[in-house]
C-alpha cells in the first residue's frame, strides 16, 4: 500500500531544504520558504512533508526566522544610518530577505508504515505542506466518527478524536482560571450528546461546582435542543440512600471513625439489613446502635455522635434522589449541580456516593458505559500530602480500574499541582489550555507524555480557545483551536462591566 507515501501530491512546493552547520540531521532540518509562500501563512506548528523516491518524511515547523545578510553586521548598518543614508536605498537589501523555517522530523512514512526518522533528508529537497490524508493517519485522527473538539491550525483538518482513544483511559483538562476549561467541557458534552446510536453513545455525568451548565438544556436560536437529554439536579435535592451504604462507606464519610467503631457499626448494619423490610435512615441506625447491648458505652457514644453529624447534613434519606440507575442513560447527561452547597465536605460526600454507585452499577452492567466529568477536580481528588477528601479514594479507584468497566473520568482543574498524582497519572489524554504558573507548567511537563520543554514554553502563550492535546488520543502532541460551542453559555461568562450594567 503506497497510499501513505505520497501518491496524492497536488500541493505546490513551499520551500527548499538548505545545509546549515548542524542540519539536515535525522532529527531536524531547515528550509528556505519560497517567494510565493513568503506572504502566505505558514505557522509555527504547521506540518510539512519532504518526498523522496522511497519515503516521505513528515515534519513540523518549530520556528520561523527572517534573515537578511545586509543587516547582519551592526557596524555597517550604523555607519550607513549615521551618514543619513538608508541601506535599502543603495543595496537591493529587500531582495535578500529570507524566511527560514526550522523543522523537526516526526517520522518516515514508507510502504511498511510509519517509522522513526533515522536518516537525514537531503539539502536541496523540496518541502510541501503535509497532505491531509497522510496527516490524518499520522496524527491518528478519526475524521468520520470522532469527537470534534476543534481545528488543526494552518491545515484544513478537523480535530476529531476517536471516542475510545479519547475517553476510555481518562482525560485531564487543565488551564488557568478563565483559560476555557468549562467552554471546552461544553463542547465535549455537545459532542457526546449528539452522537448517533450506531456511533456508540455513553451516558454522561457532570459535577457542576458553579452551576454553569444548566444552559446546556436550553434551545439555541439555531434550533439545537438538548432539553430531552439533559437533567440537572440541584444538590439541595440530592439524597443519599442510607440502605445502600456499607459501614465502611459510612466510615469513609467520617474519616476519624476508629476501626473498632466501624466494626461495631458493621455488625449493626448487617443485622438491620436482615431485620428491616422498609428502607431505613441514619436516625434508624442511631436507634439500633443505642439499643445494641454488645457495644460498650464509649463506642456507642462516639458512633452516635458521628452518625448524628452525618444526619445533620440532611443528605441521607431512605431512598436516593435522583434514582441513579434510571437517570444514567446512553446519550443523556445528568448534571449534579453542587453550586448551592457551601460545605466542601457535603459536596465531596455527594461526589463520593454517586461515583461509588456508578462504579458498582457499571461492574454489574446495570448502566451504560459512562463518562464522568468532574469540574474543580482538585477539590474532590486533591494530592494526599495537601488535603484530605472523602471522594479521593473512589476517584483514584476509577482512575486505576475504570477503564476495564468502561467508566471514564474527565478531570478538570486549574491547579494540576494540587491534583492527586495517582489520578492525574492515570489520565492518558491531557488537554492543556493556557497555563502560566511555572510550578504547574513544570508539573505538567513531568506528568504529560511526550510534552517537550519547547511545547511547554508555548503553553504559557496560548490564547483563549487554543489547546495542546497529548497522550492516548493523538499519536503526537498537537495544538488545537477549540471549535465554537453550539449550546448557550451561562451568564457567568459575561464581563464585569456588563454585570454592573445589568444590575443597575
Ligand atoms: N474556545 C473558546 N472560544 C471562545 N471563547 C472562549 C473559548 N474558551 C473560553 N472562552 C471564553 O473565555 C471565558 C472563560 O472561559 P471558561 O469559563 O471556560 O474558563 P474556565 O477555565 O472554565 O475558568 P474557571 O477556572 O474560572 O472556571 C468565557 O467568557 C468563555 O466564553
Ligand atoms: Mg470553569
Image (cartoon, rainbow, N blue to C red):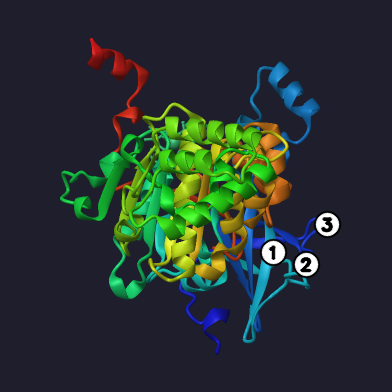
Residue 85, percent across and down? 65, 22
- Residue 449 visible to an observer of this rendering: yes
Circle 1: is it few (<14), some (14-19), or many (20+) Cα within 10 Å?
many
User: Which residue is at 66% across, 30% downward?
Assistant: 87
Helix, strand or loop for disc 2: loop
- Which quadrant does the C terminus fall into? top left
The answer to whether residue 143 is left or right of residue 190 is right
Q: Which residue is mark 3?
A: 22
User: Mark 2 and 1 residues: CB-CB less than 8 Å, in contact?
Assistant: yes
* Location of residue 156 (image quadrant): bottom left
* Location of residue 369 (image quadrant): bottom left
Sooner in the amino-acid sequence: mark 2 or mark 1? 2
Q: Nearer the viewer, residue 446 or 309?
A: 309
Residue 391, percent across and down? 55, 44
Sooner in the amino-acid sequence: mark 3 or mark 1? 3
User: Which residue is at 47% across, 73% downward?
Assistant: 133
Q: How many marks?
A: 3
- Which quadrant does the N terminus fall into? bottom right
Q: Which residue is mark 2?
A: 26
Q: Which residue is mark 1?
A: 105
Helix, strand or loop for disc 3: loop
Amino acid at each position: 500500500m503506497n497510499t501513505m507515501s505520497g501518491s496524492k501530491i497536488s500541493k505546490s512546493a513551499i520551500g527548499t531544504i538548505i545545509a546549515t552547520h548542524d542540519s539536515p540531521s535525522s532529527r531536524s532540518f531547515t528550509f528556505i520558504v519560497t517567494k510565493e509562500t513568503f506572504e502566505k501563512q505558514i505557522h509555527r506548528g504547521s506540518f510539512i512533508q519532504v518526498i523522496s523516491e522511497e519515503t516521505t518524511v513528515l515534519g513540523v515547523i518549530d520556528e520561523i526566522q527572517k534573515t537578511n545578510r545586509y543587516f547582519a553586521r551592526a557596524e555597517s548598518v550604523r555607519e550607513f544610518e549615521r551618514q543619513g543614508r538608508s541601506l535599502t536605498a543603495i543595496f537591493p537589501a529587500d531582495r535578500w530577505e529570507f524566511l527560514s523555517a526550522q523543522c523537526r522530523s516526526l517520522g518516515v512514512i514508507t510502504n511498511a508504515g510509519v517509522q522513526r526518522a533515522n536518516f537525514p533528508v537531503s539539502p536541496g529537497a523540496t518541502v510541501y505542506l503535509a497532505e491531509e490524508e497522510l496527516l490524518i493517519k499520522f496524527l491518528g485522527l478519526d475524521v468520520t466518527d470522532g469527537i470534534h473538539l476543534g481545528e488543526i491550525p494552518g491545515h484544513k483538518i478537523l480535530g476529531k478524536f476517536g471516542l475510545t482513544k479519547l475517553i476510555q483511559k481518562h482525560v485531564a483538562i487543565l488551564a488557568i482560571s478563565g483559560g476555557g476549561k468549562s467552554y471546552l467541557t461544553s463542547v465535549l458534552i455537545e459532542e457526546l450528546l449528539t452522537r448517533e446510536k450506531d456511533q456508540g453513545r455513553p451516558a454522561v455525568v457532570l459535577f457542576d461546582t458553579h452551576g454553569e451548565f444548566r444552559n446546556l438544556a436550553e434551545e439555541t436560536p439555531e434550533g439545537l435542543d438538548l432539553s430531552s437529554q439533559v437533567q440537572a439536579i440541584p444538590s439541595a435535592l440530592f439524597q443519599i440512600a442510607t440502605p445502600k451504604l456499607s459501614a465502611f462507606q459510612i466510615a469513609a464519610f467520617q474519616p476519624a471513625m476508629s476501626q473498632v467503631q466501624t466494626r461495631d457499626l458493621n455488625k449493626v448494619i448487617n443485622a438491620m439489613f436482615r431485620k428491616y423490610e422498609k428502607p431505613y435512615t441514619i436516625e434508624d441506625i442511631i436507634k439500633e446502635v443505642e439499643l445494641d447491648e454488645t457495644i460498650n458505652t464509649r463506642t456507642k457514644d462516639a458512633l452516635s455522635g458521628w452518625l448524628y453529624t452525618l444526619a445533620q447534613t440532611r443528605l441521607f434519606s431512605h431512598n436516593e434522589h435522583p434514582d441513579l440507575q434510571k437517570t444514567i442513560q446512553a446519550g443523556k447527561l445528568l448534571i449534579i449541580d453542587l453550586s448551592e452547597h457551601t460545605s466542601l465536605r457535603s459536596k465531596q460526600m455527594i461526589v463520593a456516593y454517586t461515583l461509588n454507585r456508578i462504579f458498582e452499577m457499571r461492574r454489574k452492567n446495570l448502566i451504560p458505559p459512562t463518562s464522568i466529568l468532574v469540574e474543580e477536580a482538585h477539590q474532590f481528588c486533591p494530592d494526599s500530602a495537601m488535603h484530605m477528601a472523602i471522594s479521593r479514594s473512589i476517584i483514584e479507584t476509577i482512575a486505576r480500574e475504570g477503564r476495564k468497566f468502561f467508566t471514564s473520568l474527565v478531570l478538570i482543574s486549574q491547579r494540576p499541582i494540587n491534583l492527586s498524582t495517582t489520578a492525574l497519572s492515570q489520565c492518558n489524554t491531557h488537554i492543556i489550555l493556557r497555563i502560566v504558573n511555572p510550578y504547574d507548567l513544570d508539573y505538567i511537563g513531568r506528568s504529560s507524555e511526550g510534552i517537550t520543554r519547547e511545547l511547554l514554553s508555548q503553553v504559557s502563550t496560548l490564547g483563549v480557545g487554543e489547546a495542546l492535546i497529548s497522550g492516548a488520543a493523538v499519536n503526537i502532541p498537537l495544538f488545537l483551536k477549540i471549535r465554537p460551542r453550539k449550546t448557550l453559555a451561562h451568564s457567568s461568562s459575561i464581563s464585569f462591566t456588563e454585570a454592573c450594567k445589568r444590575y443597575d
